[in-house]
Image (cartoon, helix red, strand yellow):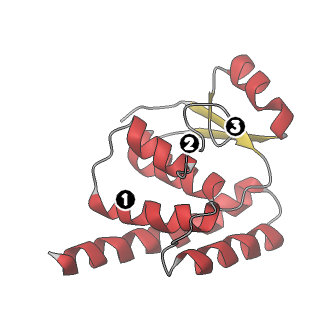
Amino acid sequence: MENHRKWVTREKAKVDRIACPWLIKHFVDSDPQFLFVPASKVLDIAKEQNALPFDIPDIELGHHDSKCSFDAIIEKYELKDPALQELAKIVRGADTDDPNPSPESAGLEAIAEGFRQITKDDFDNINKQFHVYDALYAYCRLKIANQE
Protein backbone atom coordinates (compact mmCIF):
# COMPACT_ATOMS: atom_id res chain seq x y z
CA MET A 1 0.00 0.00 0.00
CA GLU A 2 1.31 3.44 -0.92
CA ASN A 3 1.46 6.23 1.62
CA HIS A 4 0.94 9.98 1.67
CA ARG A 5 0.11 10.70 -1.96
CA LYS A 6 -1.90 13.61 -3.24
CA TRP A 7 -4.85 12.77 -5.47
CA VAL A 8 -6.75 15.35 -7.50
CA THR A 9 -10.12 15.29 -9.24
CA ARG A 10 -13.02 17.51 -10.23
CA GLU A 11 -15.04 19.29 -7.55
CA LYS A 12 -18.75 18.71 -6.79
CA ALA A 13 -18.35 14.94 -6.46
CA LYS A 14 -21.26 12.54 -6.76
CA VAL A 15 -20.67 8.78 -7.26
CA ASP A 16 -17.29 7.84 -8.77
CA ARG A 17 -15.45 10.80 -7.21
CA ILE A 18 -16.62 9.65 -3.77
CA ALA A 19 -16.21 5.92 -4.41
CA CYS A 20 -12.65 6.39 -5.66
CA PRO A 21 -11.40 8.24 -2.58
CA TRP A 22 -13.00 5.53 -0.41
CA LEU A 23 -11.24 2.83 -2.47
CA ILE A 24 -7.92 4.69 -2.42
CA LYS A 25 -8.04 5.27 1.35
CA HIS A 26 -8.94 1.67 2.18
CA PHE A 27 -6.90 -0.29 -0.38
CA VAL A 28 -4.26 1.88 -2.09
CA ASP A 29 -2.95 4.72 0.10
CA SER A 30 -3.20 4.61 3.87
CA ASP A 31 -2.89 8.39 4.27
CA PRO A 32 -4.07 10.10 1.07
CA GLN A 33 -4.66 13.81 0.58
CA PHE A 34 -7.53 14.60 -1.79
CA LEU A 35 -7.84 17.79 -3.79
CA PHE A 36 -11.13 18.78 -5.44
CA VAL A 37 -10.73 21.50 -8.04
CA PRO A 38 -12.55 22.90 -11.08
CA ALA A 39 -12.42 20.44 -14.00
CA SER A 40 -10.30 22.79 -16.09
CA LYS A 41 -7.63 22.92 -13.35
CA VAL A 42 -7.18 19.20 -12.55
CA LEU A 43 -4.16 18.56 -14.78
CA ASP A 44 -2.46 21.85 -13.83
CA ILE A 45 -2.92 21.16 -10.12
CA ALA A 46 -1.73 17.57 -10.62
CA LYS A 47 1.55 18.92 -12.05
CA GLU A 48 1.93 21.72 -9.48
CA GLN A 49 1.18 19.46 -6.50
CA ASN A 50 2.71 16.24 -7.84
CA ALA A 51 -0.75 14.72 -7.43
CA LEU A 52 -2.29 11.76 -9.20
CA PRO A 53 -5.36 12.81 -11.22
CA PHE A 54 -8.45 10.62 -11.33
CA ASP A 55 -11.93 10.66 -12.85
CA ILE A 56 -11.30 13.11 -15.66
CA PRO A 57 -11.29 12.32 -19.39
CA ASP A 58 -8.26 10.85 -21.15
CA ILE A 59 -6.19 9.72 -18.17
CA GLU A 60 -5.25 6.29 -16.84
CA LEU A 61 -7.50 6.50 -13.76
CA GLY A 62 -10.57 7.63 -15.68
CA HIS A 63 -13.46 6.11 -17.61
CA HIS A 64 -12.52 3.61 -20.33
CA ASP A 65 -15.06 1.92 -22.55
CA SER A 66 -17.95 0.96 -20.25
CA LYS A 67 -15.89 1.11 -17.07
CA CYS A 68 -15.58 3.97 -14.58
CA SER A 69 -12.63 5.32 -12.61
CA PHE A 70 -13.35 2.95 -9.71
CA ASP A 71 -12.69 0.07 -12.14
CA ALA A 72 -9.50 1.75 -13.38
CA ILE A 73 -8.10 1.98 -9.84
CA ILE A 74 -8.96 -1.66 -9.14
CA GLU A 75 -7.15 -2.67 -12.33
CA LYS A 76 -4.09 -0.43 -11.89
CA TYR A 77 -3.47 -1.54 -8.31
CA GLU A 78 -4.39 -5.18 -9.04
CA LEU A 79 -7.01 -5.38 -6.29
CA LYS A 80 -8.32 -8.94 -6.43
CA ASP A 81 -10.91 -8.83 -3.64
CA PRO A 82 -14.15 -10.34 -5.04
CA ALA A 83 -16.23 -8.00 -2.86
CA LEU A 84 -14.54 -5.01 -4.53
CA GLN A 85 -15.40 -6.48 -7.93
CA GLU A 86 -19.03 -6.70 -6.80
CA LEU A 87 -18.94 -3.15 -5.44
CA ALA A 88 -17.49 -1.99 -8.78
CA LYS A 89 -20.62 -3.28 -10.54
CA ILE A 90 -22.78 -1.12 -8.24
CA VAL A 91 -20.60 1.97 -8.72
CA ARG A 92 -20.38 1.45 -12.49
CA GLY A 93 -24.15 1.11 -12.75
CA ALA A 94 -24.66 4.33 -10.78
CA ASP A 95 -21.98 6.31 -12.62
CA THR A 96 -22.17 5.22 -16.26
CA ASP A 97 -24.75 4.41 -18.90
CA ASP A 98 -24.39 0.70 -18.10
CA PRO A 99 -27.26 -1.02 -19.94
CA ASN A 100 -27.51 -3.67 -17.19
CA PRO A 101 -26.83 -1.93 -13.89
CA SER A 102 -26.95 -3.86 -10.65
CA PRO A 103 -30.20 -3.47 -8.69
CA GLU A 104 -28.35 -1.44 -6.04
CA SER A 105 -26.99 1.11 -8.54
CA ALA A 106 -30.10 3.30 -8.73
CA GLY A 107 -30.18 3.57 -4.94
CA LEU A 108 -26.51 4.53 -4.80
CA GLU A 109 -27.02 7.21 -7.45
CA ALA A 110 -29.95 8.68 -5.49
CA ILE A 111 -28.04 8.60 -2.21
CA ALA A 112 -24.98 10.21 -3.83
CA GLU A 113 -27.05 13.04 -5.29
CA GLY A 114 -28.77 13.56 -1.96
CA PHE A 115 -25.45 13.84 -0.14
CA ARG A 116 -24.19 16.27 -2.75
CA GLN A 117 -27.21 18.46 -1.97
CA ILE A 118 -26.85 18.39 1.83
CA THR A 119 -23.08 18.66 2.31
CA LYS A 120 -21.16 21.92 2.47
CA ASP A 121 -18.24 20.82 0.25
CA ASP A 122 -16.52 17.75 -1.22
CA PHE A 123 -14.61 17.03 1.99
CA ASP A 124 -17.82 17.02 4.03
CA ASN A 125 -19.34 14.80 1.35
CA ILE A 126 -16.59 12.15 1.46
CA ASN A 127 -16.60 12.17 5.26
CA LYS A 128 -20.32 11.43 5.30
CA GLN A 129 -20.49 9.09 2.31
CA PHE A 130 -17.54 6.89 3.30
CA HIS A 131 -19.97 5.19 5.70
CA VAL A 132 -22.21 4.33 2.74
CA TYR A 133 -19.28 2.63 0.99
CA ASP A 134 -18.26 0.84 4.19
CA ALA A 135 -21.79 -0.56 4.36
CA LEU A 136 -21.91 -1.45 0.65
CA TYR A 137 -18.55 -3.20 0.91
CA ALA A 138 -19.80 -5.23 3.90
CA TYR A 139 -22.94 -6.06 1.90
CA CYS A 140 -20.79 -7.19 -1.05
CA ARG A 141 -18.57 -9.32 1.20
CA LEU A 142 -21.67 -11.02 2.60
CA LYS A 143 -23.10 -11.51 -0.89
CA ILE A 144 -19.86 -13.14 -2.08
CA ALA A 145 -19.65 -15.34 1.04
CA ASN A 146 -23.21 -16.56 0.48
CA GLN A 147 -22.34 -17.53 -3.11
CA GLU A 148 -19.47 -19.77 -1.99
Q: Are marks 2 and 3 in contact (CB under 8 Å)?
A: no
Q: Nearer the viewer, residue 47 or 120?
A: 47
Is the C terminus in the top left, top right, bottom left or bottom right quadrant?
Answer: bottom left
Question: Which residue has dot 2 on it?
Answer: 64
- Which one is earlier in the sequence, the residue at label 3 or at label 1? 3
Question: Which residue has dot 3 on it?
Answer: 57
Q: CA distance from mark 3 to mark 1?
A: 23 Å
Where is residue 17 shown, x and y percent of the image?
65, 52
Disc 2, SS: loop
Q: Are marks 2 and 1 in contact (CB under 8 Å)?
A: no
Q: With respect to residue 130, does 27 lie above or below?
A: above
Disc 1, SS: helix
Give the number of the mark in front: 2 or 1.
2
Give the number of the mark in front: 3 or 1.
3
Q: Nearer the viewer, residue 74 or 126?
A: 74
Where is residue 36 shown, x and y percent of the image?
75, 43
Identify residue type, mark 3: Pro
Where is residue 97 shown, x and y percent of the image?
63, 63
Tell me what residue is drawn at x 78 percent, y 22 percent.
44
Crowd tier of the residue under label 3, counting other residues whose Cα lies within 10 Å: few below 14, some 14–19, many 20 or above: few
Tell me what residue is drawn at x 54 percent, y 30 percent.
5
- Which one is earlier in the sequence, the residue at label 2 or at label 1? 2
Crowd tier of the residue under label 1, counting other residues whose Cα lies within 10 Å: few below 14, some 14–19, many 20 or above: many
Identify residue type, mark 2: His
Question: Which residue has dot 1 on it?
Answer: 84
